[in-house]
Image: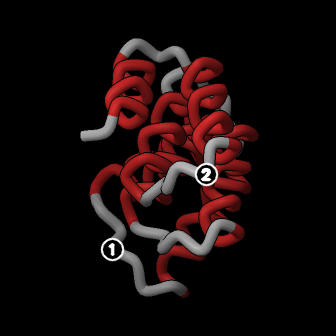
Amino acid sequence: LSPHSAAISACERSAKWSMALHLFAAMAQERVERDTILYSSVISACEKNAEWPMALEVLHSLTADSVEVDGIACSAAIAACAKGAAWAQAVQLFKGMRILKLHQDTIAYNSAITACGRG
């Protein structure tokens, strides 16, 4: 585990989403490789604070950075949308997972249902 990854994981666990984003951006400036696990950690940090617009921005930057999108990152983004009552975005992501043939786990299903219930 790199020092950057460890710091972002600590930010995720303590729900310090802005610090996670700051470290994540610094990694890009320093040209440090960012993998799917790191993206998922940043998305999860955003989710813990219902910062769904930022979670979606990080998720969309995955493809721009040529990093493989996975079900964990998508599920975390759906959970962020659920916490922010952004049901339309949650449903769109959930459908997108199916189109991309990504595993839709219990978190994805429950978060999509929760988002619809709040919307």
103 and 95: which is toward the camera:
103
Image spot of residue 39 (x, y percent): 50, 49
Tell me if residue 97 comes above or below residue 10 in the rendering. below
For label 2, the residue is 31
Label annotation for residue 60: none
For label 1, the residue is 103
Q: Are marks 1 and 2 in contact (CB under 8 Å)?
A: no
Residue at 48%, 74% (x, y): give it: 68
> Which of the two labelled residues, at mark 1 and mark 2, occupies the earlier sequence position?
2
Q: Is residue 42 visible?
A: yes
Indicate the secondary structure of the residue bearing disc 2. loop
Q: Mark 1 is on which residue type?
A: His
Left or right: 116 as drawn, with respect to 7? right
Q: How many marks?
A: 2
Q: Mark 2 is on which residue type?
A: Arg
Residue at 73%, 55% (x, y): give it: 88
Image spot of residue 10 (x, y percent): 35, 20
Image spot of residue 1 (x, y percent): 24, 40
Label 1 to label 2, Cα distance in Å? 30 Å
45 and 7: which is toward the camera:
7
